[in-house]
Amino acid sequence: AQSVTQLDSQVPVFEEAPVELRCNYSSSVSVYLFWYVQYPNQGLQLLLKYLSGSTLVKGINGFEAEFNKSQTSFHLRKPSVHISDTAEYFCAVSDQQGGSEKLVFGKGTKLTVNP
Amino acid sequence: DAGITQSPRHKVTETGTPVTLRCHQTENHRYMYWYRQDPGHGLRLIHYSYGVKDTDKGEVSDGYSVSRSKTEDFLLTLESATSSQTSVYFCAISERQGAQPQHFGDGTRLSIL
């Protein structure tokens, strides 16, 4: 079974600074990888996904993530954050094998952008 | 945004009472999911459905049951609510599992006193 570890539960940064939210996964098979964002009192929205191909994936709101198979990581980055990026971010993984490929989520990272 | 409606959005009830949460979709997606979200645990899958009357258990299914009699509706029932089931519940849908991302509703905040 796969699992996801988000290494930081909280990340405070100043506005316009770069940020990296870390995600590592474990799985015995190839995986699909996702980052979701959750704003206060809302559901989760898809930021970006890695299915195959280029290991650098660009998403909405200026975020990008890089898939590193050897390090089993899928870290999320943004070169310059805004106050509006304050939210909780979830990394998720799904096995590529046929059958019941359910999503497994990390415990989340709360990003707080300070002025 | 995907057409997903959860009802009710908020509910307060007492221990031992039955509770049913509803998820309604207008996307005609095959797969529907119920998650619970708790601080420090992220989202955990309770049950999911892969078609009308086809359901399966997730990671934290004890104390919960589900039903799907129509493509658009997926019900989550707590037969006898306990305080440990106080949580925020999210419904999600997807066209298929694996590569297709899931789309989430806005959640139901359930408090069991």
Image (tube, helix red, strand yellow):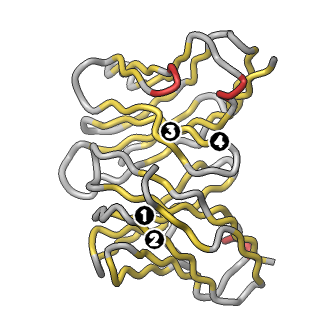
- Distance from the alpha carbon under mark 2 to that under mark 3: 22 Å
Coordinates of residue B5 in the picture (x, y in percent): 52, 66
Callout 2, which amino acid?
A: His
Q: CA distance from mark 3 to mark 4?
A: 10 Å
What label sits on residue A77 in the rendered view?
none
Name the residue beneath numbered marker 1: B33
Estimate the x, y position of residue A1 in percent, counting from the top left.
Answer: 36, 48
As helix, strand or loop, the secondary structure at mark 1 comes to strand
Do circles 1 and 4 both sit on a common chain? no
**Mark 2 or 3, closer to the camera:** 2
Alpha-carbon span between mark 1 and mark 2: 11 Å
Q: Position of residue A18 (x, y in %)?
A: 62, 11
Which dot marks residue A39?
4
Distance from label 1 to label 4 (Cα)? 20 Å
Query: Would you name the residue on which mark 3 appears?
Result: A36
**What residue do we see at 58% from left, 35% from top?**
A89
SS at mark 2 in the image:
strand
Counting residues from the N terminus, which is met first, the one under dot 1 or under dot 2?
2
In front: label 1 or label 4: 4
What residue lies at 33% left-to-right and 80% top-to-bottom? B70
Query: Numbered disc 2: what chain?
Result: B
Name the element at disc 4. loop
| Kind of residue at badge 1 | Tyr
In this rendering, do the residues under marks 3 and 4 share a single chain?
yes
* Up/down of B3 relative to A95, above or below: below
Q: Does the CB distance between marks 3 and 1 fall below 8 Å?
A: no
Which quadrant holds residue A66?
Answer: top left
Q: Chain of mark 1?
A: B
Q: Which mark is residue B24?
A: 2
Mark 4 neighbour density, 10 Å: few (under 14) some (14–19) many (20 or more): some
